[in-house]
Amino acid sequence: MLPFIPEAMKEKVYEGEITLMDALELAELSPLILFNFADELRSSTVGDVVTYVVNRNIYITNMCRGNCGFCAYRSEKGFMLDMDQILEKVSEASKAGAVEVCIQGGFLPQLDIDYYTSVVENIKVEFPKMSIHGFSPMEIFYACGNSDVSLEEAFERLKAAGLDTLTGTSAEILSDRVRRIICPGKLSTEQWVHTIMTAHQAGLKTNSTIMYGHVETLTERLNHLFILRSIQQRTGGFTELVPLPFMPYNNPIGENMLSQGKFMTTGIEDLRFYALARIILNGHIDNIQASWVKLGKKLSQVALHCGANDLGGTLMEDKISTASGSTNGEYVAPAEIEWIIRSSGRIPKQRNALYEGI
Ligand SMILES: C[S@@+](CC[C@H](N)C(=O)[O-])C[C@H]1O[C@@H](n2cnc3c(N)ncnc32)[C@H](O)[C@@H]1O
Ligand SMILES: Nc1c(NC[C@H](O)[C@H](O)[C@H](O)CO)[nH]c(=O)[nH]c1=O
Ligand SMILES: N[C@@H](Cc1ccc(O)cc1)C(=O)O
Ligand code: SF4
């Protein structure tokens, strides 16, 4: 075990060139050494500004043909918003000062590319300034099959319709061993990589996510970050990384863990992962988001000292984390987010999904 970080390793990190083996060695460091180094990298990369977005989640449907064992959100007899209901939610978001709507859902045979483009077009007609961050690689990949449309064409059409950014969800852990266990009906690793790269090549930026803390090994968890890093080297299309600790309640994967006496990741494990993500992605992905809905307000605040530089969105509505056991609420007002940031000695700044200032 390393008692400190050797200078040669630090240099490799600054060059953005550490390997998975290096990362596995760093993972054994004591937490305070890791946090300090990640904080130093955060400071030299993005300084003391901490960003957040005033946004609203909109869930189109919770019905889904997927069978992800970690999902507590999907429901057989669920809801499906019609276009007027979607527009009503966008209108509420707009009145509450949101600059972005984050649209999420499930995948279904009737949701084809025409459907997704029409959602975007209808929103943009009434709310031309509202930024639309939405849909997952899984949903678009599936919709292409429903529509006999290529991925290239789908992303071009979505972009032309006014989609600003695509979400980087459905990544989970990019390992086929893990995916066979937790989401056998989802895109394979290769399909996810191909889909996200096709979006980037069509000029659509995305964020990136990792849902960790279930059946994956440390190597699989860290290798996911190296896959993201290599995509970023080729496309430059990722805006941020959002680490998502797995929430184990009301879903089969979690229930299996709970029955074996395994609970969710500890706070210190979350912080170590944030620090490692900052270190591994240094020079490649500059923004690391502390998701308050997953971590809670207090741990998100601590994460700002362990490599994170963003607090995500105000959200206004959350169905996915709540369904799987989060008790962190669904909304944090901009004034409170700003207070959290200022009282951490940082400078708050509103952004959009492209990390442009508002
Ligand atoms: C519920 S899905 C919605 C989008 C789409 N249906 C999909 O799966 O791509 C969005 C993301 O939420 C995250 N998620 C779902 N259940 C979760 C849980 N129990 N704990 C943590 N994150 C979860 C997963 O990373 C998933 O990709
Ligand atoms: N929408 C959710 C977020 N966060 C905000 C995004 O990740 C993103 O930065 C923003 O929408 C793009 O500008 N985080 C969660 O954990 N859960 C969400 O539902
Ligand atoms: N879809 C969100 C991120 C997200 C959504 C739901 C989650 O449970 C977790 C994360 C985004 O891309 O910005
Ligand atoms: S995570 Fe997404 S794809 Fe999987 S079952 Fe839930 S809604 Fe469907």
Image (spheres, helix red, strand yellow):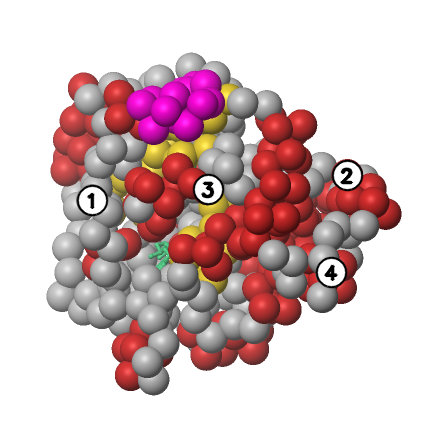
In contact (CB < 8 Å): disc 1 and disc 2? no
Amino acid beneath label 1: Gly
Location of residue 255 by image quarter: bottom left
Q: Residue at x 21, y 52 (%)?
A: 327
Secondary structure at badge 2 equals helix
Q: Provide the residue span drawn in magenta.
A: 338-352
Instruction: Calculate the distance from the C-alpha at mark 3 to the C-alpha at mark 1.
Output: 19 Å
Q: Quadrant of the N terminus?
A: bottom right
Q: Earlier in the sequence, mark 3 or mark 4?
A: 4
Q: Earlier in the sequence, mark 4 or mark 1?
A: 4
Instruction: Calculate the distance from the C-alpha at mark 3 to the C-alpha at mark 4.
Output: 23 Å
Instruction: Calculate the distance from the C-alpha at mark 1 to the C-alpha at mark 2.
Output: 37 Å
Location of residue 238 by image quarter: top right
Mark sitting on residue 14: 2
Residue assigned mark 1: 329
Instruction: Calculate the distance from the C-alpha at mark 4 to the C-alpha at mark 1.
Output: 39 Å
Query: Would you say the beta carbon of the disc 1 residue lies within 8 angstroms of ligand 2?
Result: no
Can the viewer see residue 206? no
Query: Would you say the beta carbon of the disc 4 residue lies within 8 angstroms of ligand 1?
Result: no
Q: Earlier in the sequence, mark 4 or mark 2?
A: 4
Residue assigned mark 3: 303
Query: Would you say the beta carbon of the disc 3 residue lies within 8 angstroms of ligand 2?
Result: no
